[in-house]
Amino acid sequence: MAMEFSRCHPETRAAQALGAHDPETAGVIPAVQLSTTYLRAGDNTYQAGRVYGRGDNPTPESVEALLASLENGEEAMVFSSGMTAAIAVFLSLKPGDHIIAPQVMYWGLRLWLQTTGIAWGLKVTFVAMDNLVAVRQAVQPGKTKLIWIETPANPIWSLTDIQAVAEIAHAVGARLAVDNTVPTPVHTRPLTLGADIVMHSATKYLNGHSDVIAGALITAKADETWDRIRAYRKSGGIMLSPWDAFLLLRGMRTLFLRVTRASATAQVLAEKLYGHPLLEAVLYPGLSQHPGHEIARRQMQNGYGGMLSIIVAGGAARAIAVAAAVKLWVRATSLGGPESLIEHRASVEGGSDNPVPPGLLRLSVGLEHPNDLLDDLIAALKE
Ligand code: PLP
């Protein structure tokens, strides 16, 4: 990182993308390199040290440098999706290795662990990550190699104490990986709290415009595990495409503006909706009544994120009716875009061990005026 940026606030580093530009044309915005292959010189060497595009393209490097800087990591890698990024971490382990994962987490990843992960040979224990006694009891010294956490966790936004779980993991030589998709480095920087790897679905807030599927990993140390992950990214062809890397860097320039605005609006909505007679609960870490609020206050800065959930009184049918009645909120899955999304989460997650309450609506707060969002939701609740 250039000296002038190492002294700057993260907002400045993001806005200027660490000064990335096109050295060939002096373009202020870096160029997109689409070539899938690179010239070999007459002396049989590769002039720029690059060989083939499946594992090697310069365009993602600017966004990787920015991610490493914002998350306080040594290196970052971008992937074709959040799922491929997470799976790359799990596949850097060996069949037979034990991992501990949360009962409450992004359901797609839980499903992968329960099916492909276990079939591949991973031994997985799912625990309540807000219960440190349960986490300690789940550890198998010598066998546990990884603890995976997500905080605040989808879709009930329970909090996990990153520092405490890092200590539990390190005491038995295991690593701690944190899905930091929802808080983003604007609110939480897990590597500064002892985590070893941070993962993002960059599809969400990092890109922020609902138009790129992307994932990222950031490591505290570029060690042997990191080399294995890089080798798998190359052989598996799962790095982010140059176009998408360009768009991701563009999106990340406004990360701080977007995330702080979405969080401020989510806080207003949570406070105004709390205690509404047609709701059983409002789940948001920024509410003092939230069970994880104290941990959130300790490990989140600049707000508590743009995600909240409401539990509609009357169960699934009433919740689905409320989602059907909104005019402004967009009925769709995902999160982190400029448009606010509403979703009946149990309809998505299904399954018998589904921890999602039937009346839960997940809200991804976007960049609209808070009063417009509130009026629309309250009108839909009363319909
Ligand atoms: N982690 C979280 C918290 C998510 O919300 C998602 C997607 O919804 C993922 C991981 C998976 O990311 P992607 O959809 O980019 O593969």
Image: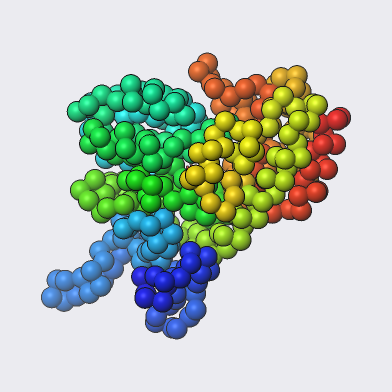
Residue 250 as seen in the image, left or right of residue 66: right
Front one among 112 and 4:
4
The picture quadrant where one finds residue 87 is top left
Residue 189 in percent (x, y) is at 44, 51
Q: Nearer the viewer, residue 1 or 231?
A: 1
* Residue 142 visible in this rendered orientation of the protein: yes
Q: Quadrant of the C terminus?
A: top right
Q: Residue at x 54, y 44 (%)?
A: 297
Residue in view at x 39 percent, y 82 percent: 24
Residue 74 quadrant? bottom left
Would you say 47 lies left or right of 14 here? left
Q: Is residue 255 above or below residue 316?
A: below
- Which quadrant holds residue 19? bottom left
Taking the spot 20% from the left edge, 48% from the top edge, the residue there is: 224
Give residue 319's position: percent from left, percent from top: 73, 26
Q: Is 196 placed above or below 321 here?
A: below
Instruction: Please tell me which residue lies in front, 177 or 43.
Output: 177
| Rendered location of residue 239, percent (x, y) | 37, 53
Q: Is residue 351 left or right of residue 90?
A: right
Count of numbered labels shown in the rendering: 0
Identify which residue is drawn at 70% across, 21% down: 316
Q: Is residue 115 visible in this depiction of the protein? A: no
How is the structure coloured here?
rainbow
Quarter holding the N terminus is bottom left
Vertical order, 202 against 87 (above or below): below
Which x, y percent locates residue 121? 27, 25
Please, is residue 143 above or below residue 26 in the view? above
Which residue is the extreme one toward the top?
352
